[in-house]
């Protein structure tokens, strides 16, 4: 079977190894050789790309990461680097769910990711993992997808403990949205592009709710960390989402990083990244 990979992970297309969850948790060969291998559940599901911390014995959590569209958030072609750094800096196993083949839309993409995450939760639990140590993470457009996935998982009686959302895109349509003009120069004309990319993944089919602001009110929505950038035109969206979240879960947190623009997870600014990983680790603990 030919496994299609999105452009963000094209450098690991050569890896074809199928791994079980047990093998993922208990690697028996060099970390260097397996850190980017894919886990493919079956021909109809999505591949999962695995990244390991420096020392598996120090691993304290598992992060299931639904990444955003790189062309929207400025991370295009950089997710491997982001995930490698995330695994190292948080001492976590990171599983990035790769849905970038460009042929599946909402709600299909939500249903597929839900099925993958449900399978992983169940298999981790069967292998003795404390599922309270699993964190669902997403960024940008991926947050809209993850919000719908979380609600479907709750309906399937999967207990989601924590969620982290970076610079979330929360609305269905930004055509009539009034942008902060002072921030446009650092956001790469996102106002002109975001609706095109939303339409790439979100059809008009409302089988599953994709309004993240409404989903935040859903009973059982997990404790969540919302992280925005001070220079991001979506900053107000993140604040609004947080205000909705705390109505349901008072333990939710919000943090805004100074001088950070949309897609700052790929930033080379040491101060921004130091602050970012501090916020993540404080929340995970």
Image: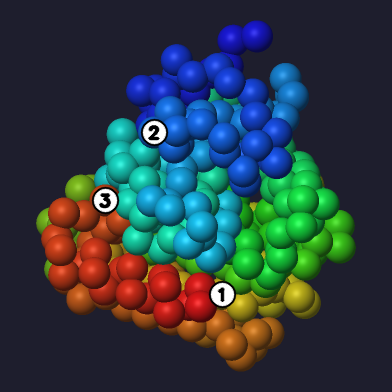
Instruction: Judge left or right: residue 162 versus residue 15.
Output: right
Along the viewing direction, whichever of 6 and 109 lies nearer the viewer? 6
Q: Is residue 53 left or right of residue 49?
A: left
Say what secondary structure mark 2 lies in.
Answer: helix
Foreground mark, 3 or 2?
A: 2
Mark closer to the chain start, 1 or 3 = 1
Give residue 227's position: percent from left, percent from top. 39, 71
The answer to which of marks 1 and 2 sits earlier in the sequence is 2
Q: How was this image coloured? A: rainbow
Can residue 83 be seen here? The reply is yes
* SS label for mark 3: helix
Residue 32 numbered mark, or none: 2
Would you say 106 lies left or right of 96 here? right
Q: Which residue is mark 3?
A: 266
In the picture shown, does residue 182 fall above or below 205? below
Give the alpha-carbon distance from disc 1 to disc 3, as whole Å: 21 Å
Identify the residue at image location x=72%, y=30%. 41
Image spot of residue 26 (x, y percent): 62, 43
Name which residue lies at 62% across and 46% down.
25
Up-down: is 57 above or below 247?
above
Q: Nearer the viewer, residue 23 or 276?
A: 23
Is 67 placed left or right of 215 in the picture? left
Mark 1 or mark 2, whichever is nearer to me: 2
75 shown above or below 12: below
Residue annotated with mark 1: 224
């Amino acid at each position: 079977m030919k496994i299609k990979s999105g452009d963000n992970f094209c450098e690991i297309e050569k890896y074809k190894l199928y791994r079980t969850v047990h093998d993922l948790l208990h690697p028996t060969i060099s970390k260097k050789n397996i850190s980017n291998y894919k886990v493919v559940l079956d021909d109809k599901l999505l591949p999962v790309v695995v990244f390991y911390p420096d020392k598996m014995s120090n691993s304290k959590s598992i992060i299931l990461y639904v990444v955003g569209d790189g062309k929207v958030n400025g991370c295009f072609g950089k997710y491997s680097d982001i995930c490698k750094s995330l695994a190292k800096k948080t001492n976590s196993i990171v599983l990035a769910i790769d849905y970038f083949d460009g042929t599946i839309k909402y709600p299909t993409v939500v249903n597929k990711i839900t099925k993958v995450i449900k399978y992983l939760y169940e298999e981790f639990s069967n292998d003795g993992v404390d599922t309270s140590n699993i964190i669902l993470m997403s960024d940008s457009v991926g947050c809209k997808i993850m919000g719908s996935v979380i609600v479907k998982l709750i309906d399937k009686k999967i207990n989601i403990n924590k969620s982290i959302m970076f610079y979330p895109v929360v609305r269905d349509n930004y055509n009539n949205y009034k942008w902060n003009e002072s921030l446009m120069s650092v956001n790469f004309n996102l106002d002109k592009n975001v609706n095109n990319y939303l339409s790439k993944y979100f059809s008009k089919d409302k089988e599953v709710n994709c309004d993240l602001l409404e989903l935040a009110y859903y009973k059982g929505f997990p404790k969540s960390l919302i992280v925005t950038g001070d220079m991001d035109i979506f900053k107000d969206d993140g604040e609004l989402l947080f205000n909705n979240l705390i109505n349901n879960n008072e333990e939710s947190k919000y943090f805004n990083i100074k001088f950070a623009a949309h897609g700052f997870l790929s930033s080379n600014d040491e101060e921004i990244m130091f602050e970012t990983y501090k916020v993540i680790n404080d929340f995970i603990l």
